[in-house]
């Protein structure tokens, strides 16, 4: 990849980040960008046979733009009316976060470059893994930055160890090395404007520091010899290690037992865990103790979902597919698959 091509595209990514940030903060600016969307693209959104609380908002917005254009007042009316029709199912309040795929697709060239640049840098670093953050965000609710994270190939997740990374933000490029579990930088991060970004300096930084991730001594996943866990804290650690993928108590216990971060002499540890997690969950006022429950974590607290018609593991695996599932997304996806849920 040519130096000029890379540096020009880095500026474009940062420009895209600035636009996304303003869409997130200014509804009038968001509406201006929505009104500039390609009509054929808008028709594809409106005519989609997919449906759901959030998808229906996007379809109605697309239809409105095609017919008459949209402004902030009309946009907020559409969102509010759909919230009233779907009580408790639309928990996102920021209009951009609801509509982010419509805006983000206009920056697809920047994202395509980001992925190519990531592969290019991976070849320079060596045998490692890469994780790419785009404007879609971790939970597909949009964000105003993109990032490339490189980490040891033996780690299960980028959050399990050292990261060599570069981020592209509104009017800003930042890179460095972070010890993610310890939540601290390995050295001082480099923060610079896109105009002043020097590719040769970044290459030098990579060459001088890449062995920090390549030679990292990787401990077995979930091992934490310095911390004594309770049943609950061990469970929360498992959920976080697996990027908060919803799990049953049995699945959580299997990982706890495998890694030895908590031991018990109890005869039915999974059942005990199910009861403890249910009682400790932030929605514990629901007294149902059914085993057909899956858990996520919110900070250091569990939250539970009881499936009236339990989701088979194979279906859940196909739904999560290496992504993150929010409460809203879980409700929407399961509903589309005719699986009734109660929260």
Image (tube, grey):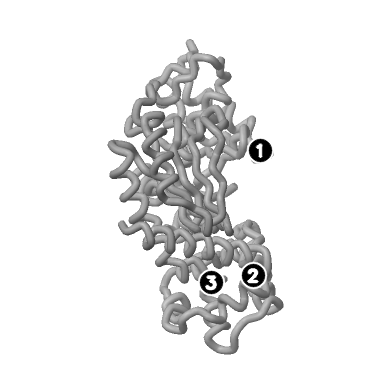
Disc 3: which residue:
58
N-terminal of the pair, mark 3 or mark 1, is 3
From the viewer's perspective, tell me whether residue 260 is left or right of residue 22.
Answer: left
Residue at the spot 53% in from the left edge and 36% down from the top edge: 290
Disc 1: which residue:
282
Q: Rate crowding at label 3 as few (under 14), some (14 to 19) or many (20 or more) other CA atoms within 10 Å.
A: many
| Mark-to-mark CA distance, 3 and 1 | 31 Å
Residue at the spot 42% in from the left edge and 31% down from the top edge: 251
From the viewer's perspective, tell me whether residue 230 is left or right of residue 247.
Answer: right
When the figure is inspected, residue 19 is found, relative to residue 295, above or below; the finding is: below
Q: Rate crowding at label 1 as few (under 14), some (14 to 19) or many (20 or more) other CA atoms within 10 Å.
A: some
User: Do the residues bearing badges 3 and 1 touch, measured as CB atoms within 8 Å?
Assistant: no
| Mark-to-mark CA distance, 1 and 2 | 27 Å
When the figure is inspected, residue 122 is found, relative to residue 289, above or below; the finding is: below
Q: Secondary structure at mark 3?
A: helix
Question: Among all residues in the image, which is located at the extreme bottom?
Answer: 67
Q: Of circles 3 and 1, which is in front? A: 3
User: Do the residues bearing badges 3 and 2 touch, measured as CB atoms within 8 Å?
Assistant: no
Residue 79 badge: 2
Residue 34 quadrant: bottom right
Q: Position of residue 204 (x, y in %)?
A: 40, 40
Q: Secondary structure at mark 2?
A: helix
From the viewer's perspective, tell me whether residue 33 is left or right of residue 5.
Answer: right
Residue 122 quadrant: top left
| Mark-to-mark CA distance, 3 and 2 | 9 Å
Q: Of circles 1 and 2, which is in front? A: 2
Q: Position of residue 83 (x, y in %)?
A: 65, 65
N-terminal of the pair, mark 3 or mark 2, is 3
Q: Secondary structure at mark 1?
A: loop
Residue 203 quadrant: top left
């Amino acid at each position: 990849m040519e130096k000029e091509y890379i540096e020009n595209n880095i500026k474009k990514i940062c420009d895209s980040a600035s636009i996304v940030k303003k869409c997130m903060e200014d509804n009038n600016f968001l509406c201006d960008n929505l009104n500039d969307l390609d009509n054929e693209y808008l028709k594809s959104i409106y005519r989609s046979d997919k449906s759901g609380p959030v998808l229906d908002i996007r379809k109605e917005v697309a239809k409105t733009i095609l017919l008459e254009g949209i402004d902030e007042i009309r946009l907020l009316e559409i969102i509010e009316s759909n919230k009233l029709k779907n009580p408790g199912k639309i928990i996102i309040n920021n209009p951009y976060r609801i509509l982010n795929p419509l805006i983000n697709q206009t920056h697809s060239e920047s994202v395509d470059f980001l992925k190519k640049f990531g592969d290019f840098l991976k070849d320079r670093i060596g045998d490692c893994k890469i994780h790419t953050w785009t404007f879609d965000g971790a939970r597909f609710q949009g964000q105003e930055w993109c990032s490339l994270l490189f980490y040891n190939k033996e780690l299960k997740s980028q959050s399990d160890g050292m990261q060599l990374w570069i981020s592209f933000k509104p009017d800003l490029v930042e890179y460095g090395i972070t010890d993610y579990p310890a939540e601290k930088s390995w050295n001082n991060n480099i923060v610079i404007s896109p105009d002043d970004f020097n590719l040769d300096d970044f290459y030098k930084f990579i060459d001088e520091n890449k062995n920090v991730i390549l030679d990292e001594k990787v401990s077995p996943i979930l091992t934490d010899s310095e911390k004594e866990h309770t049943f609950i804290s061990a469970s929360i650690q498992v959920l976080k290690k697996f990027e908060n993928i919803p799990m049953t108590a049995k699945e959580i216990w299997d990982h706890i037992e495998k890694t030895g971060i908590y031991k018990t002499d109890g005869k039915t540890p999974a059942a005990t865990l199910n009861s403890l997690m249910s009682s400790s969950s932030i929605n514990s006022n629901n007294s149902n103790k059914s085993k057909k429950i899956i858990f996520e974590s919110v900070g250091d607290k569990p939250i539970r979902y009881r499936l009236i018609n339990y989701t088979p593991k194979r279906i859940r695996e196909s739904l999560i597919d290496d992504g993150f599932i929010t409460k809203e997304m879980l409700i929407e996806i399961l509903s589309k698959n005719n699986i009734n849920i109660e929260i």
